[in-house]
Amino acid sequence: MLLALSAACLPGGGQGAEIRRIARPYALNLAAWELQNSLAPLSQDSPAPNLPVSPAVLSGDIEQVLAQQGIAAMPPVSTRLQEPPLLLVVSPRDRILYKDRLLLLPGLDSSQVEEVESRIDSLGLSALVVKIGGFGAAYPAIVSPSMPFKDMVGAAVEEWAHQYLALRPLGFLYLLDSLGVGQDPNVITINETLAGMIADEIGAGVYRPYDQGQGTQRGSGAAAGFDFDAEMRLTRRQVDELLAAGRIGEAEDYMQARRVFFNGHGYPIRKLNQAYFAFHGIYGQDPGSAGPVYGQMKKLRDASASLAAFVDRVSAMTGYAQLQDAVNNLPR
């Protein structure tokens, strides 16, 4: 669920220009889309059968829990129910790297998605079109109405968190990266991970009064006893090792076999490739991620007096070295 993405984040020439050319028929005009979004009345939102309250009530509930945690709702929480744009993610084939991304129109059909992916793949790259659950570059923030209520709550909080963080050093650097001013990739991971941690804690408080013990399953029909997270982490490690050894074809064959494996256990992954891991890798909590960012941030959160203190500390960071120093200086 990314804060702000546009064609400007792609390099101006070479493969970046070719990617833009391929995606142009389906690319989102973010400025026009945001203007339409900001002017449209919330009464035009898509119906959400899984939402037991109005979006306005949900936004108020989020603000109430934020206040209880000592976090000012600035900007005010405002959520609308609408299918977010699609996200095109591009990675090199020889390593997993969140190289390029571009917003696409919502509602593309499978043939259009596969056309874009295959044509970019033919450039010697790895492409994936991702359906995201929320989009915080718009205001009000966009949340998909097709998710379970618990997921809608989490998405609404997370997209607001991106808007909140954009007013602070960490989020502002992420915004610059999204606009084409490249930053340390860890800045993206720290920002997305922080937004996810805020969503986990605030979302739990918002959802609790509505909880009827249903929970949220990650995959419909998932096999009992199957540990998706452990299997996906194993897959990521093996792919990294194969790519580091220059065995690209073997890594891609392995990912295809693992995709079939996950599908067989009730997790319908459409495409498992380098771009898949590049996208999921920016979310430190995700089992498709690699690196120590989430573990370090979890240590820092556990040592913080409150969620507000943790957010204030991390949102003021401008690079990974500051996170390392903060963790290294924790009392032992």
Image: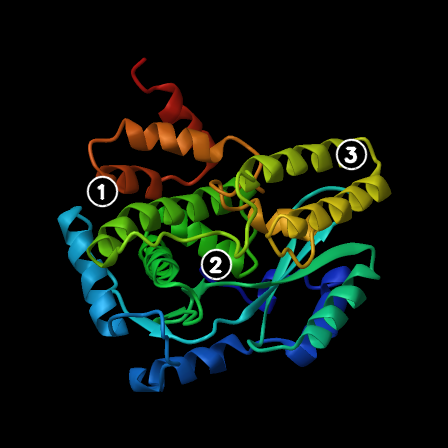
Q: Residue at x 56, y 40 (%)?
A: 226
**Mark 1, secondary structure of its residue:** helix
Question: In the image, what residue type sits under mark 1?
Answer: Ala
Q: How many marks?
A: 3
Q: What is the number of the mark on residue 242?
A: 3
Q: Residue at x 84, y 36 (%)?
A: 247
Q: CA distance from mark 2 to mark 1?
A: 22 Å
For disc 1, the marked residue is 308
Q: Residue at x 81, y 31 (%)?
A: 245
Question: In the image, what residue type sits under mark 2?
Answer: Leu
The C terminus appears in which quarter of the rendering? top left
Q: Is residue 284 visible?
A: yes
Question: In the image, what residue type sits under mark 3?
Answer: Leu
Residue at the extreme top of the image, as rendered: 332
Image quadrant in which you'd find residue 206: bottom left
Is 256 or 79 nearer to us in this picture? Answer: 256
Q: Is residue 14 visible?
A: no
For disc 2, the marked residue is 2
**Mark 2, secondary structure of its residue:** loop
Q: Position of residue 63 (x, y in %)?
A: 19, 60
The correct choice, above or below, for 300 with respect to 83 in the image is above
Q: CA distance from mark 2 to mark 3?
A: 29 Å
**Mark 3, secondary structure of its residue:** helix
Q: How many neighbours does mark 3 have within 10 angstroms: few (below 14), some (14-19), or many (20 or more)?
A: some
Q: Earlier in the sequence, mark 3 or mark 1?
A: 3
Image quadrant in which you'd find residue 148: bottom left
The correct choice, above or below, for 106 with respect to 272 in the image is below
Q: Are marks 2 and 3 in contact (CB under 8 Å)?
A: no
Q: Position of residue 141 (x, y in %)?
A: 36, 68
Q: Are marks 3 and 1 in contact (CB under 8 Å)?
A: no
Q: Residue at x 38, y 44 (%)?
A: 194
Q: Nearer the observer, disc 2 or disc 3?
A: 3
